[in-house]
Amino acid sequence: MPLQTTVIGSYPKPESVPVPDWFKAGPGIRTGQEGYSAQEYNDFRKDVASEEELEKQITRAIREVIQEQTDIGIDVITDGELRRENYILYFCRQLNGFDFDNLVKETFRNGAWSGFVPAVVSEVGPRDDRPFVLEEWQAAQSLTDQPVKITIPGPMTIIGSTANRFYKDRKELSEALVSVINREVRALADAGCKYIQIDEPVMMRNPDIAEDYGIEHVTRCFKGLPLDVTKSVHACCGYPSYLDQTDYLKADRTLYNRLATKLDNAGFDQISLEDAHCPTDLSFLSKFSHTTVVLGVVAIARSRVEPVEEIRGRVREALRFLPPHRLVLAPDCGLGFLPRDVLRAKLKNMVAAAKTFPEN
């Protein structure tokens, strides 16, 4: 059997989808993600003339994204997160406690990113009894027979992308978010979703918190899931502000070595790691004795297309430390920065490389 392939989450939004996109620069407003304001989505919602027409536009685009991934040969696909302004704030908008009317400017990611974000001003919790991520997954899964993976932001990443003005500390807020996320995750599993990914890249920015309680809290987000649901955690080293940026402050990728054993013992089925943008010493992979590693083998913020043989070289190196059945190939992170022709070329080469393993 060839190595399995997947994508992490986002796809570039086509022009036919009017939902604001933090990957794209706002004319006269910002350069890429730097300076993004949640007000852009606030303004968009005010101007929506027809919810029915918007839903048709989004569904049409999701169908195209799903078909493209299927045609390329990706094993576990996503809906491209085309409904979302970004992978974090869409989730917060569905909860009580986040104030999107009075945004505050904050700097995050060890000083690498700043923007206008909501503050937590009251107790965080669901607005009603209706799980909202479930509807998003059901809409996508209805368009294909292939398994669709759903993604949800983790507690550390939500906290590291919003302002806390209510809870006494990060840990108390994290406890509240664990409860909310677990409700969504359980509803997805009950409905038949087999691939659930929690995005937690901020653990790479705050390894002390990750070791103290962050990893444990992600484990609790998955509490109560049946064994046939693949529980995945994505921990990349961070998005830059724009395509081909060379001076962005990434998280320290050597922290994978520090966190590997604790991650391996946390009960996750898969851990998704970045390697293509900044290749590192892969010997730390030997610390994963239980967990499948989803390894980033194509860069998501660099327009250069990785040749098949280059990808094969990194896979061979990874297979020195992992058995083939515990290695999955993926992009480093979401694909929202990439032009579609570049995106397709990267994914096609990734799939072509995966098909050549295991080698005789």
Image (tube, rainbow, N blue to C red):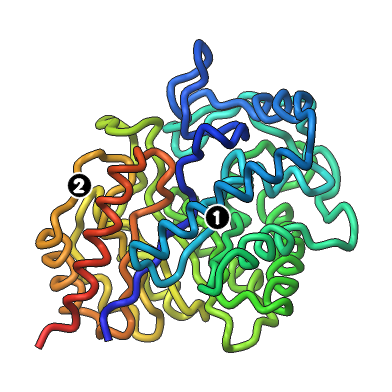
Mark identifier at residue 216: none
> Which residue is identified by label 2?
305
Q: Position of residue 255 (x, y in %)?
A: 34, 58
Q: Is residue 184 above or below residue 59?
A: below
Q: Is residue 350 left or right of residue 6?
A: left
> 58 or 242: which is nearer to us?
58
> 35 or 355: which is nearer to us?
355
Label 2 neighbour load within 10 Å: few <14, some 14-19, many 20+: some
* Residue at 58% in and 36% down: 17
Residue 311: quarter of image: bottom left
As measured in the structure, the alpha-carbon distance from the residue carrying label 2 to the one carrying label 1 is 25 Å
* Residue at 43% in and 50% down: 334
Please tell me whether mark 1 sits on a helix, a strand or a loop.
helix
Give the amino acid at mark 1.
Arg
Q: Position of residue 222 (x, y in %)?
A: 63, 74
Q: Is residue 338 above or below residue 183?
A: above
> 338 or 104: which is nearer to us?
338
Give the amino acid at mark 2.
Val
> Which residue is identified by label 1?
63
Q: Position of residue 2 (x, y in %)?
A: 26, 81
Check contact, mark 2 vs mark 1: CB within 8 A: no
Quadrant location of the C terminus in the rendered image = bottom left
Q: Position of residue 340 (x, y in %)?
A: 36, 42
Q: Is residue 279 left or right of residue 271?
A: left
Please say whether residue 251 is visible from this viewpoint.
Answer: yes
